[in-house]
């Protein structure tokens, strides 16, 4: 995929982290469960690090990187490699489907700027 030759003030990165298959379940508790391959191509850590984020970012660029608990420590290493500084962690609480509990996804806010203005936003989630 060829990217435009320009720089951005805000980059939202949602890399296709490698998770394996969908539908993994304990065969003893769910003997009829099926395992499906991911419906999209995934990237390993080296491939994600090699994304051209450095060359796409303006000097005062803000980066919002989506991750999950599994990759949270690695996400911090990646943003450091991309030459961003940690600013804030945002949690997205998704409304559960059927009987599942609340699903939380993590967005980490980073900046290339020396200082950053952070607005405190309060919210609540109720079922």
Image (spheres, rainbow, N blue to C red):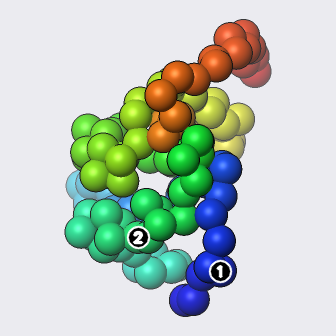
In the shown orientation, is residue 2 left or right of residue 8? left
Q: CA–CA distance between discs 1 and 2?
A: 14 Å
The residue lying at 44 percent from left, 46 percent from top is: 67
Q: Residues within 10 Å of mark 2 (few under 14, many from 20)?
A: few
Q: Secondary structure at mark 1?
A: loop
The residue lying at 52 percent from left, 22 percent from top is: 115
In the picture of the structure, the residue carrying the numbered disc 2 is 51
Does residue 111 show up?
Answer: yes
Number of numbered tags placed on the structure image:
2
Tell me where residue 63 sits by quadrant: top right
Quadrant housing the N terminus: bottom right
In the picture of the structure, the residue carrying the numbered disc 1 is 4
- Of 87 and 121, nearer the camera is 87
Q: Residues within 10 Å of mark 1 (few under 14, many from 20)?
A: few
Q: Which of pointers 1 and 2 indicates the residue nearer the eye? A: 1
Give the percent coordinates (x, y) of residue 92.
Answer: 62, 33
In the shown orientation, is residue 115 left or right of residue 32? right
In the shown orientation, is residue 108 left or right of residue 31? right
Q: Secondary structure at mark 2?
A: loop
Tell me where residue 31 sits by quadrant: bottom left
The residue lying at 26 percent from left, 38 percent from top is: 73
In the shown orientation, is residue 106 left or right of residue 46? right
The residue lying at 26 percent from left, 63 percent from top is: 45
- Of 24 and 105, nearer the camera is 105
């Amino acid at each position: 995929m060829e990217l435009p030759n320009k720089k951005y003030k805000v980059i939202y990165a949602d890399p296709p982290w490698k998770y394996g298959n969908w539908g993994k379940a304990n065969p003893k508790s769910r003997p009829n469960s099926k395992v499906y391959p991911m419906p999209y191509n995934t990237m390993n850590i080296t491939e994600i690090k090699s994304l051209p984020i450095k060359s796409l970012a303006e000097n005062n660029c803000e980066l919002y990187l989506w991750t999950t608990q599994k990759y949270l420590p690695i996400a911090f290493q990646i943003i450091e490699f991309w030459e961003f500084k940690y600013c804030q962690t945002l949690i997205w609480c998704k409304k559960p489907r059927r009987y599942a509990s609340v699903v939380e996804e993590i967005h980490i806010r980073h900046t290339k700027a020396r200082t950053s203005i952070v607005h405190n936003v309060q919210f609540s989630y109720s079922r």
